[in-house]
Amino acid sequence: MKLDWYFHVDVDPSTISLLQTAADAAVLTEGIARPCMVSVTICDDEEIQEINREYRNIDRATDVLSFPSVNYPKGLTAGQCDKQIKMEWDAEAGACFLGDLIISLPHVKAQAEEYGHSFQREAAYLLVHGMCHLMGYDHIEEDERKVMRAMEEKILSSIGQTRDDNTVTDEQLLALAREAMQRSYSPYSHYPVGAALLCNDGRVFQGCNIENASFGLTNCAERTAVFKAVSEGATEFTAIAIASKVSAPWPCGACRQVLNEFAPQIRVLVTWDGGQGEMLLTDLLPHGFGPKDLQS
Ligand code: THU
């Protein structure tokens, strides 16, 4: 799923990454089989008001505007309209153009405060709402509104963005770590480890230990999860759950150091066949060396 970005105001990289994840999830959940593209403009209230006035004759600012390019037959959405989507093929982009989205950043901020959830949560919601319009959903009639709302929820929950910010409970995070442990590649130590890293925007990245015949190249579960998160643009972490079988999998020194780079205050939860525990990284790595020490 390609997003063609137009930033008319500053947007931080982790929000951009979350919006890309949300757009990918929308297309995947809807079941669109073709490569797609959407243009996304992030602007201020003045600009969105101007667009609203020019194209919809409504002279006020709003949170999100969507301009679908696909002509969906009444009652059908993108997943059922391969033929119509195919007609929007853009050879240069190598994708079918679903339309334009305009999001007002000041509205994201204001609505996040009003609803008492994070900026990231609101940004993801508005992107998904707009994506649903571009995929043929609407909310004029009550029955279609219900269908659209359900679709929005389905997309948002597939990326860990449910109604409340802290919907991933410790129990769920531990379960995700246990699940990741099943994918451990540990033919040498036979010590499988799984991790689930919770980001401040609600996303969870899982990781497992990945061993190598050249033993020193082994990557621990925790670092697999951290590297996956950072490479997807998420760098703020609130908790990590780590699972193993035979003993308490407190993170090794290298993993403590890597966690300390991004989240010195992170909560570390462990689970194994014999029990469960929790500590703060500040207690596992007292007097840790980190980015702050390099500031002159
Ligand atoms: N391991 C982890 O995945 N995390 C830790 O913090 C400690 C050790 C893995 C690495 C190796 O595959 C196996 O456990 C035995 O050392």
Image (cartoon, rainbow, N blue to C red):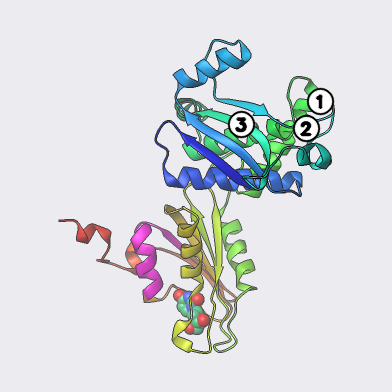
Q: How crowded is the residue under tag 3: few (<14 C-alpha within 10 Å), some, or many (20+)?
A: many
Q: Secondary structure at mark 1?
A: helix
Q: Is residue 118 visible?
A: no
Residue 128 vs 234, above or below: the answer is: above
Residue 258 falls inside the magenta stretch: yes
Residue at screen point 44% across, 86% down: 216
Q: Going by the image, does 221 lie left or right of 11?
A: right
Give coordinates of residue 34: x percent, y percent.
Answer: 74, 48
Q: What amino acid type should be assigned to the residue bearing mark 2?
A: Val
Q: Which segment is the magenta one?
A: 254-268
Residue at screen point 79% across, 42% down: 79
Residue at screen point 46% across, 69% down: 223
Label for residue 155? none
What is the magenta segment's predominant secondary structure? helix
Circle 2 residue: 147
Q: Going by the image, does 76 lie left or right of 2?
A: right
Give coordinates of residue 234: x percent, y percent.
Answer: 46, 53
Residue at screen point 62% across, 14% down: 56
Circle 3 residue: 100
Instruction: Compare marks 3 and 2 and give the one earlier in the sequence.
Output: 3
Label for residue 143? 1
Image marks 2 and 1: residues in contact by CB distance under 8 Å: yes
Q: What amino acid type should be assigned to the residue bearing mark 1?
A: Asp
Dividing the picture into quadrants, the one containing residue 99 is: top right
Residue 115 falls inside the magenta stretch: no
